Amino acid sequence: MGGEHSVFALIKGGLTGHRSWARQWRDAAPKAAYDVVIIGGGGHGLATAYYLAKRHGLTKIAVLERGWIGGGNTGRNTTIIRSNYLYDESAALYDYALKLWEDLSQELNYNVMFSPRGVLMLAHSVHDVQSAQRHIHANRVNGVDNEWLTTAEVKAFCPPLNTSPDARYPVLGGALQRRGGTARHDAVAWGYARAASALGVDIIQKCEATGVRRDASGAIEGVETSRGFIKTRKIGVVAAGHTSLVMQMAGQSMPLESYPLQALVSEPVKPVLPCVVMSNTVHGYISQSDKGELVIGAGTDQYISYGQRGSFHVIEETLAAICEMFPIFSRMRMLRSWGGIVDVTPDRSPIISKTPVKGLYVNCGWGTGGFKATPGSGAVFAATIANDDPHPIAAPYALERFRTGRLIDEAAAAAVAH
Ligand code: FAD
Ligand code: PYC
């Protein structure tokens, strides 16, 4: 997997030669017209383009990215992958995605470093225990693996975790999804980009969508960009955090709010943490990357913003929580921190939908948890665009639910404070 592209190009590029390794797709200039234009070159937009070409045989596709591909939330997240959500609609979507992760490196011929090392969600109170067990039962009914571990079993599964009864919030047990884990986030963008490019998709970086043109009937006619007008009858908006701004260009307002969400990594150390650990009560989540860095994430800031950074007190509290759960890490140095902008819906579930505008489709609202869904989201959104008809897995995620009230309230399963 990766073959000549990975090891050889890494050596050629040297330690800072990241980009030469990454740039294995053709960087295209915009053409005058396309069958489909995807706005947003994150994992979801690139996956959508890939599946449009691969599964639906469309070839005249462009992905417009105003910065560089994967430079948004795709390259900023903590890479946790799991499918242990509560409701049937969520199990269908997230477990479909998880199954695609399992073969994604082979599918793309690119090592996305999917590592199903287990996601352990801790319980620190009677409420946590009941909620976790409700999720476990619901997951099992839907054929999604999830199991309860006692405190002793938690300790055996994750030895560095402090399970002392003297802790401020002692660990009372945990829900473990063994098939869950992590992947390398930017490799996902690069893998989809390379595979899509090989199928003829134009990936156009440094090209910002600045306007949407509609014809006399109101249908999509094209997109204005920082590099000129592009004609198309179909636009897929996949611009996480900035969806409302793009949709406003087509006169559509969205049920979304945008918040900063932060993460940080430590200096690299030898393998010490065998799984992903999440705690909603103490509030922090942590895993160890293959490079050895501890990857740590926070909750969202409590104010709306488009600034790709968050408040210091939020990561300060997160690190206090991590030290409380893992006193063994309290002397580690942090290497870098960053923020992304996530767009959040009223029910904390995504929107994958046609819109009232003919030819305009939207994929957004993944909030703090869309990385895990990348392959599934791309596949069902591609089908929705290609057929102008919602894919069965996407159908419950249509915009109509905010009118009908048929919400999919996954606030608890989101597992991250927001
Ligand atoms: P993005 O990768 O953000 O792509 C959208 C792209 O659209 C951007 O590259 C942007 O530049 C581009 N764009 C915007 N406006 C325009 C325009 N006008 N013209 C052209 N391009 C435009 N999810 C998980 O499942 N697990 C996690 O552990 C996890 N941790 C997270 C931690 C942090 C700190 C953050 C910020 C998010 C986390 N998430 C996690 C959420 C996850 O990262 C996102 O849901 C997911 O990456 C969204 O992917 P995307 O492709 O839709 O968005
Ligand atoms: O959705 O699992 C998740 C997640 C973890 C960290 C941020 N989001």
Image (cartoon, rainbow, N blue to C red):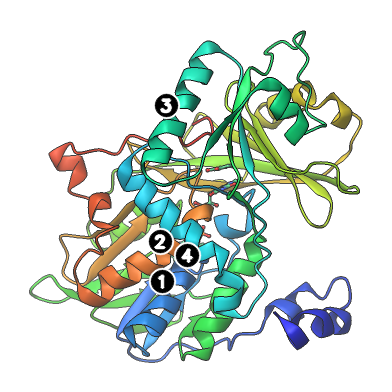
**Which one is earlier in the sequence, the residue at label 1 or at label 4?**
1
In the image, what residue type sits under mark 3? Answer: Arg
Give the image location of residue 42, x and y in percent. Answer: 52, 65
Give the image location of residue 232, x and y in percent. Answer: 28, 82
- Viewer-side residue, 133 vs 220: 133
State the residue position of label 1.
Answer: 48
* Mark 2 Cβ and ligand 1 under 8 Å apart: yes
**Which one is earlier in the sequence, the residue at label 3 or at label 2?**
3
> What SS does tag 2 mark?
helix
State the residue position of label 2.
Answer: 377
- Viewer-side residue, 8 vs 36: 8
Distance (Cα) linking label 4 and label 2: 6 Å
> What SS does tag 4 mark?
helix
Distance (Cα) linking label 3 and label 4: 27 Å
Checking the image for residue 375, the label placed there is 4
* Mark 1 Cβ and ligand 1 under 8 Å apart: no
